Image (cartoon, rainbow, N blue to C red):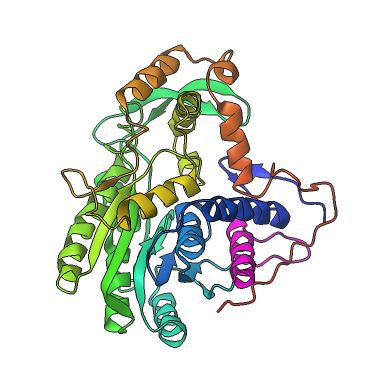
Amino acid sequence: MIIKPRTRGFICTTAHPAGCARQVEEQVKYIQAQPKWEGPVNVLVIGASTGYGLAARITAAFGAGASTIGVYRPSQGTEKRTASAGWYNSAAFEAMAKEAGLKSLSVTGDAFTDETKQKTVQAIAEKLGQVDLVVYSVASARRTDPVTGETANSVLKPIGKPFTNKTVNFHTGEVSEITLEPASDQEIQDTVTVMGGSDWELWIKALRDGGVLADHATTIAYSYIGSEITMAVYRDGSIGQAKDHLEETAHRLNEELSSGGGRAFVSVSKALVTQSSSAIPIVPLYVSALYKVMKEKGIHENCIEQSYRLFADRLYSGKEVPVDEKGRIRIDDWELRDDVQQEVAQLWEAVTSENVEDITDLAGYRKEFFQLFGFESDGVDYDGDTNPVVPIENVR
């Protein structure tokens, strides 16, 4: 079929296999061009098919030569429907890992279920023995509790009072004002259930109970703080409550693992174009302004660049891991520099529908959004007939 992007709000309902493969290839080449680093031997990435999870898997495999197991949702294509971008990304990763002589395996399923956890434990036991790095990078709108069977849905809302600010339709460039109503107590609780640290904790328990987590293992999850512009809808909002819970979980896990030489961290990342961030009102406009400033200053990073800095310069530098007063690794340090935030604030005050394309990097945001789904990749024939069915050889 001829595969073109079809959008519905902040998601693309189609994905291009060749374009996704090109994006993965570019990330692999970036890591291969960096200095090698001594790191983990066997790595489990939960949520491995896109964003930081995919970048972590690529970094560990092609930067440290690690064997990897990636967990993600199944989404095979058919003759009439494309697979997800995550499926195509994983297929490309598996193919490149095999070519490089790296051991890799994919486990597909809902990461929240006991079934997927046990299937992963079995795969680790059979293929790797134990893992010494566990990356938790799951972002989802809903979660069904494996014990109660109840399904919770996350929301992206402020807390306490309505919040009004600018936002942009990144497809059309229309800048408008949006008011978000505050989350209810139940919505806050449900968001913590979905996006907090409880499932991360269940994964570590399952791995330990199954005997497949090395005593000295490191585990890491991702968080975000952001600027004053996004604070009310993000860090001070319902999702921020979930991130607080995630960070509290990291402290508990660190205490549990430390007796064997293990450790647990939360890494605070910079704002990037991801499927998750595209769903948050206000954030696409903020990211567009941020990209403009950071690119002009020569300090812009994408997912793979952030991932390399996290692993090579922080977690596995051979030195004590630098953390903030709450024990978090800060890879958002360049984003939150005073000079960066001052210039972003100036752009924010000035931006309108008429000048948004000129004074922000909305074009860059838009391109990266489509690249998440394999479109707008250089060197790909998007008018050519493409087979949407792409098998993954080493998958269960």
Residue 351 in picture, x, y percent from top left: 49, 15
Residue 69 in picture, x, y percent from top left: 47, 72
Instruction: Identify the residue shown where x is 25% and y is 61%.
Output: 264
Depicted 212 relative to depicted 284: above or below: below
Pick whichever, 151 or 389, lies toward us.
Answer: 389
**In what quadrant of the picture does the C terminus appear?**
bottom right
Depicted 114 relative to depicted 234: above or below: below
The image quarter in which residue 355 lies: top right
Q: How many marks?
A: 0
**In this picture, residue 171 sits left or right of residue 350:** right
Residues drawn in magenta: 76-100
Q: Residue furthest bottom?
A: 126
**In what quadrant of the picture does the N terminus appear?**
bottom right
Q: Is residue 50 magenta-colored?
A: no
Label the magenta part by its dominant secondary structure.
helix
Q: Could one spot residue 190 in this view of the protein?
A: no
Residue 187 in picture, x, y percent from top left: 31, 48
